[in-house]
Amino acid sequence: MTLEQKIGQFFFPAVFINDTEENIQETERLIKEHNIGGLTFFHSRASAATNYESKKTVEHNDNSFEKLKELIVRFQKCATTPLLMSIDAEWGLAMRVENTPQYPYAISLGALPERYEYLAYEVGKRTGLDLKAAGIHYNLAPLADINNNPNNPVIGYRSFGQDKVKVSSFATEYLRGLNEVGVLGCLKHFPGHGNTSVDSHLGLPILEETLEELMENELIPFIKGIENNVDSIMIGHLAIPALNDGKNISATLSKNVIENLLRKKLGYDGLVISDALNMHSVSKLYETKGELEWEAFNAGNDVLCFPINIAEGIQEILKNASPERIEASYNRLLKCKQKAGILDGNFAPEGVFDFESTSILNRLIADKSTTRIKDNNNSLHLFEAKNNEKLAKLSLYNNTHNIFFKSLSIVLPSPKFDLESGDTVAIEILTEKLKDFDTLLVSLFVPKAKPLNNFDMDATTLAFLGELFSNKKCILYVFGNPYALQVIPNLKSTVGIMHVYQDFREFQESAARQLLRNSKCRGSLPVAINSI
């Protein structure tokens, strides 16, 4: 290859599975004309995080997986050098593609006791097999971020929690599972995006920690990953003034962060990939097309994820970079392609989904992660109420036909009610209906995993819930992100609280079994909750 062709290998533009034929042909042109090295797949343009402000509706497409496979075969046919196909699949392909296996969020795995870290390995392994079924050999996961800021708008449930030891071991096990089946992994977002309160898709977060503080906490999972030969590390769009002479420079554009800290101090010589260069924290910094791509490469990134100005970026790097630096980055990428086996022509989709194995794994995780936050006699209260015929079940943000209630119905029959929105009239009617009941089993299905707008829980519903806790014996089962507990009022007045981390069928069935048997709960909250 010429130097220019080698530089083309560093570019991994975004591809949208549900896109127009015109845009797909444009990607084919990029592959042919610029010898790009790989692609990063997203569901659709509307789903991209940086399009958040547009409020465009993400259209459901049951055929997304078949479309993805077709596109991968089509794009590989265009390429002179096999493309390294990548995707964000932190909790499985379902993060981007409909009707594909979904695994629990990292925070759900973080609720597991340390001795069950092998389940993180199994999630990595099964995710890797699912990716290979699509023809993808590079997973931009898992997160090595330690989520020690409850107000973090973008990491939260995607992190294994706030314990540096657990985050380190679970991330390493997840990576080991990916590698076991021939899929590359990636630790992100170096040097740690957990203690931030700004979404880097939309602005530049600033970390105020010193290098010593980073070495004692945020960097620990990355150090363990380096010790275990992690395939790649993604640099986050976040500023650490202490590492840049007090300046708010994004880590993705900082030689001090990549070359001095990651390469020299921590001794990492593997592949370094930037976070998406379309993110607003960096995308609007330079007026000249190609300058951002050059600055990111110059800072030490080997691969440029989601670049916008490919032709101009290639020319800027060709004009400014030394041949030695180009060769070094090219060799790192080549090594990853060799490890994934794609240079031998083994890049076609292979295998099929095993939904049964996925379900078994999810059930295991559910059984081991459910967390008893308060009261050892939840079942006793309910059965006493049942005998006096003063028990009712209440479902919030889900109807009464939810799997949790269905699983309880034979052994614990009682009237069932639901509230699926914060409509004040509906709340008034429901309040009247609940007057005759002393004890309530409340199942709260948290609407969203992200904390924006109180996880999409209405203020009226939260106020109603707080009143119920004051006036009734309430046993609360929360299905969702544990940080949602922080916005639920008056929790101290409940009789019991159980936290269940997903609303999957397996998690709802597991919660019902636990309640009926009053069995031991092995899970623990992976993050500190101030309201309990």
Image: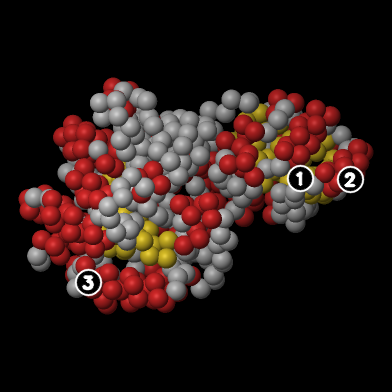
Quadrant location of the C terminus?
top right
Colour logic: secondary structure
Q: Nearer the viewer, residue 80 or 295?
A: 295
Residue 126 spot, x, y in % from top left = 41, 57
Q: Is residue 425 visible?
A: yes
Q: Earlier in the sequence, mark 2 or mark 3?
A: 3
Disc 1 to disc 3: CB gap under 8 Å:
no
Q: Is residue 381 visible?
A: no
Q: Which residue is mark 1?
A: 422
Estimate the x, y position of residue 79 in percent, counting from the top left: 23, 73
Q: Quadrant of residue 385?
A: top right
Q: What is the three-letter code of the residue carrying label 3? A: Glu
Residue at figure coordinates x 10%, y 66% from the top left: 1
Q: Residues within 10 Å of mark 1 (few under 14, many from 20)?
A: some
Camera-nearest residue between 373 and 515? 373
Q: Which residue is mark 2?
A: 429
Q: Is residue 45 above or below residue 237?
A: below
In the image, taking residue 513 as reference, residue 341 lies left or right, namely left
Q: Determine whether the residue tagged by mark 2 lies in a helix, strand or loop.
A: helix
**Near-viewer residue (263 or 294):** 294
Type of amino acid at the residue the image marks with label 2: Ile
**Residue in view at x 46 percent, y 62 percent:** 45
